[in-house]
Image: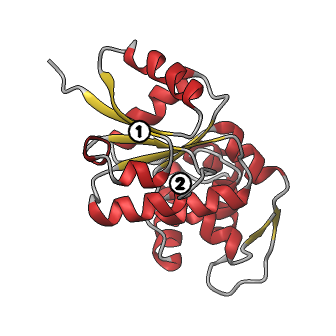
Amino acid sequence: MEKEIKIALVDDHALFRNGLRGLINGNHSCRVVAEASDGKEFLENTEAMAADVVFMDIAMPTLSGDKATAMALSQNPNLKVICLSMFGDEKYYSRMMEAGAKGFLLKDSSIEEVFAAIEAVMNDEEYICNDVMQALSGAMRRNNDTEMLSEREMDVLFGICQGLSTQEIADKLFLSKRTVDTHRANILEKTGSNNTASLVVYAIKNNLVEV
């Protein structure tokens, strides 16, 4: 029997938590073990801090989601935090990813996407919903004023920031998938980024792409 995934919900809207709890508990592999109405209450909840996955709103009274995420991860680095927000713009995305969140969903995401995000973060991968990636990349344009990355690395980076898969980038640039993987690894190393999520934040903040 597979291990049950323990979920904590942190959101200041009780009605939203109730609905999400019912949907999550309908999946036999997941169970909501704790809830909190703000970041402070979350940090003081032992069961919530011991959960496997935390769904965290960002705009909450008393203590915001990004600050609560950073504080929680300093105490329990094994927590997998997924932001669940009404807002998908770069400001909110950057704040949560810089705080250490592994995923970002909008509150109107489907329950299938919620479970896809849980599966991804439990496999030590990041998960960014398609709507957020499209919002981030929709107004992006290339900025070639950089000496850190080669022209081909910039091509790959721009594809990543547009939410393209490795295969889609390879097809677009007429490269092999292995070559794109190599470029991606080099970009991560040069920028000091740990994963795609942090790389997108780095690219935007350092004007490698413009929003």
Q: Element type at marker 1?
A: helix
**Residue 129 shown left or right of residue 131 in the figure:** left
Residue at x 35%, y 61% (from the top left corner): 73
Circle 1: residue type: Ala
x 68%, y 74%: residue: 205
Near-viewer residue (143 or 55): 55
Do the numbered discs 2 and 1 sit on residues whose CB atoms are within 8 Å? no
* Residue situated furthest left in the rendering: 1
Q: Residue at x 36, y 40 (%)?
A: 53
Residue behind mark 2: 65
Taking the image as drawn, is residue 151 in sight? no
Residue 109, percent from left and from top:
63, 28
Q: Is residue 201 above or below residue 175?
A: below
Q: Give the residue at the far bottom of this rendering.
A: 147
> Which residue is located at x 41 percent, y 34 percent?
118
Question: How many numbered markers are drawn?
Answer: 2
Q: What percent of the width, then of the height, locates residue 15?
A: 58, 24
Question: Which residue in the protein does label 1 denote?
Answer: 120
Q: In this rendering, which labeled residue sits more in front, label 2 or label 1?
A: 2
